[in-house]
Each structure stands twice: as structure tokens, then as C-alpha cells.
Image (tube, grey):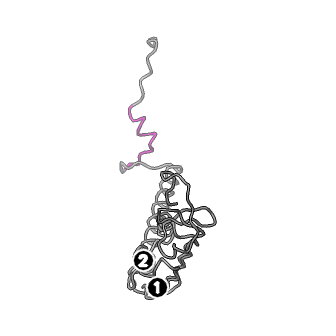
Amino acid sequence: MAKAAGRKPNRRPGGLLRRLRVRSAGRAVWSNAQRRLMLGLAATALALFLIAGVVGGVNYYLMHSGQFVLRHIDVQAGDTITRELVCEYLKLQEGMPLFEVDIGRRQQDFLRDAATIRSLSITRRLPDRITVRVIEREPLGRLARRPFAVDADGTIFVRYLGMESLPCISGYRDGLVVPG
């Protein structure tokens, strides 16, 4: 008998099972490539689990072991910025975990918000100390009718201490002058 056009020939029953290499117990046997893939996936999952455990353990040790507690806060500040203001803004308190402080982020926030600061360095010293060094801008002149000062870089900042003795700058447009 001729085969009908476009029809696939009948497959033998059990052809799919034979391709899976069925054992007599009814379990499928994996090929070597499938075994390697599963072993690779299992090894990757185990490695990720171990890395997460190590990172969590180190984090727990640094934050909660009591070995690294902030006991000394050394602040070298200028004329207008006090130690208390620096500690309050940076949220530093004695007795807190030393590694709870995100030094880079707090330094960026402080420099962004305080135009009177030229530079700020925060250093963590193990096992129990943080050192903060603040360098303020030195005013060269003051703006008339405003509590603003100007430094050598042309940066305008708010300043109240010692403004009387500075040379006065006038003749500027009031709307164009903003700190920073």
C-alpha cells in the first residue's frame, strides 16, 4: 500500500521510551551531558549558598560580635563647625558598631549639604576609633546685605563668624547669588 502524501509514518510504540533509555525499573537514565549539566548546577548552587553564608557570617561578626564597637570619636573641626555638629550630622555615637557607618555615603552627604566645608575625611581605625577631619573654607570677602562669604575659589557660603572685618562686595544682582 502506498503511503499518503504528507503523512508521517507510524512510529513504533515505545520509541520515546527507548530514546530515554528506560531501565527495567522504570526510571529514566540521564545521558552524560545531562549528568554534567546537573552536577554543574548543583555545584553552582552549593557555591552560592556557601558564599552567602560566609558573607552573612562576616557581617554578623563585624556588626554584632562586640569586637568592633565605636569608643573614640576624634573630630578636628574648624571655627564654625563644632565637634557636636559633626557627630550629629554624621550620626556618630559612642557604643555603636564601628562598621555600621557608611563612610563614603556620609562624607558625600555632608559635603553636598555644607557649603562651608572645603574637604572632609573620615577614617576608621581598628578596633574602636573613627577620626573626622574637617577643613572649612576661608572667606576672603563678604556680600553686602547678606550673610554670605566668598572664598578664593569663588564659592559662596553662609558665614556669620568674623564677617565684620572682611571686605564688602556690592553691586551684584540679588537673585543670582546662592550658596554653593
Secondary structure, mark 1, is strand
- Residue 179: horizontal and vertical position, in percent? 50, 60
Kindly report the distance in space between the C-alpha atoms of the residues bearing marks 2 and 1.
Answer: 13 Å
Q: Amino acid at mark 2?
A: Leu
Secondary structure, mark 2, is helix
The stretch drawn in magenta includes residue 21: yes
Determine which residue is flagged by label 1. Answer: 73
Which residue does the image show at 39% across and 76% down from the upper left? 88
- In the foreground, 67 or 54: 67
Please identify, in this view, whether the residue under mark 2 or under mark 1 is nearer the observer.
Answer: 2
The stretch drawn in magenta includes residue 160: no
Q: Quadrant of the N terminus?
A: top left
Specify the segment rendered in magenta. Answer: 13-24
Determine which residue is flagged by label 2. Answer: 85
Horizontal side of residue 11 vs 177, given as left or right: left
- Residue 11: horizontal and vertical position, in percent? 42, 27
Q: Amino acid at mark 1?
A: Ile
- In the foreground, 16 or 80: 80
Quarter where residue 22 is shown? top left
